[in-house]
Amino acid sequence: MNQLKAGVASVNITPPLGLELSGYGFGKIRGILDELYAQALFLDNGEEKIIIITTDLIGLNHEYVNNVREAIKAETGVQKDHILLCSSHTHSGPATMFLRQWGKIDREYIRCCEKKLIGAAVWASRNFAPAKIGFGKGLIDSISYNRIWKGGSIDPEVGVLKIDRQSGDMMAVLINFSCHPVNLHSYGNLVSADFPGYARRIIGKVKGDICVFYTNGAGGDINPVGDTNNIIYAERNGTILGCEALTIAEQIRTTSNANLWSKTKNVRIPLQKLPSKKALKKARQKGIDELKRIMKNRSSLRDAIGFNIAMQNAKLDIEWAEDALKEVEKGQPDKYASIELQAMGINNLTMVGIPGEVYVDIGLGIKRNSQSDYTFIIGYANGCIGYIPTREAYKIHAYETAIRKVYGVYPFSPTVGEIVMDSAKELLRSKDN
């Protein structure tokens, strides 16, 4: 292992007013509760280089991520499979990826954001210094719960990566925690990083000008305590998380030696057949009838947001049925979705990047089979294909199994969770090959 060098950068990616929020049918942004950021971490041990970029966004598609990686590689020389780009999945941010009827993407904003992500990575790679690194973990079981099964699994682990300067001063902290950041959700149509933003600011108040990264784990079926539209709980949960992360960070011993590696694996996810033409036409008509009913009974809906959501859900059903009909008319050969898994290692830490909303039991299964002392599951990494539920979720027709139509046309096979978990385990086993 060789002497570690590290560089960090942070860039403001707060959108202007008037853009559409994403995460549900919320409508346009009316104000800024707190600003959104992207952060870049560059690590170099003289033999390998890696870059981690975190964003306060709902998600990004793989093609967009690939363009960013290509540009960063051209500017820095860091290989594409050594770059990890992830999102926090805040539902109080702008539309940045395709979600059917859930926010129109502003192309000017997304192009600007792309330049900022590239710029942050390049800045971090050119402004590095000798550094030390270490890892720790703690537990919080009071800020999250399983929204599918009462008393079901959560992942209470708070993973922390700490970067120190050679002097011993703290330079950066990366937090890993599994939970949907939806305490604010559609709160007044205001932009916010949600509870992770509060966690970041708590650490900043104590430590001053350090870079605080947030990575979401396997929180596909995990919600924060206090649920949505609740600024009090956003602050509460973020404060608890930030304090725990800082407590862990202060106890981590860091070393200037660093072994770095990164690998990716392409995985094929089988897709289910679509319903018959007759069933799809019936679904389309049902959506049309629902749309008429909503318009007729608009006054009975409790508020404008309720009206907009009801309208967009009906439009979602219509649009999906029409797209599905086009696919059926073309014929339905066996279809697969291709995704990229990534494993990135730093000494006794392994990070597993998965491009989706991963159910917690899948993440826990990967952790149990990891040989590393510390394992961080990073969801919404290098893209987002939608929810990755367990087979049990399909048996009970959980919300996450039905909402696939927001992300695409074809539903996943109920084996999707097992395939992702087994492929991640295989990727971890192959890291020394």
Image (spheres, rainbow, N blue to C red):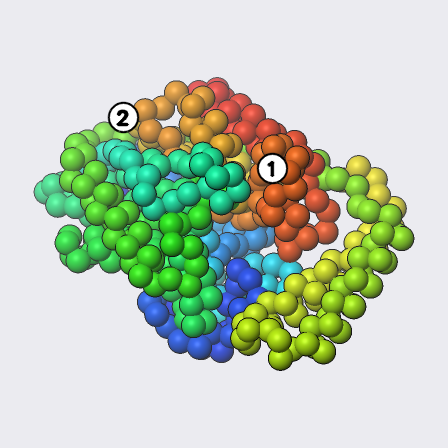
- In the depicted view, which residue is nearer to us: 345 or 400? 400
The label on residue 1 is 2
Q: Nearer the viewer, mark 1 or mark 2?
A: 1
Q: Residue at x 23, y 36 (%)?
A: 133
Q: Residue at x 70, y 65 (%)?
A: 314
Image-based side of 283 in relation to 393, left or right: right
Q: Residue at x 16, y 35 (%)?
A: 251
* Amino acid type at image mark 1: Ala
Image-based side of 329 in relation to 373, left or right: right
Q: Specify few, some or many for label 1: CA neighbours under 10 Å numbering under 14, 14-19, or 20 or more.
A: some
* Amino acid type at image mark 2: Met
Marks 1 and 2, how far apart at CA: 44 Å
Q: Specify few, some or many for label 2: CA neighbours under 10 Å numbering under 14, 14-19, or 20 or more.
A: few
Does residue 107 appear anywhere in the picture? no
Q: Is residue 106 above or below residue 415?
A: below
Q: Residue at x 39, y 20 (%)?
A: 371
Q: Quadrant of residue 305?
A: bottom right
Image location (x, y in percent) of residue 14: 39, 68
Does residue 240 appear anywhere in the picture? yes
Image-based side of 194 in relation to 337, left or right: left
Q: Secondary structure at mark 2?
A: loop
Q: Residue furthest front?
A: 300
Image location (x, y in percent) of residue 296: 72, 78
Q: Quadrant of residue 417?
A: top right
Image location (x, y in percent) of residue 287: 76, 64
Q: Earlier in the sequence, mark 1 or mark 2?
A: 2
The label on residue 393 is 1
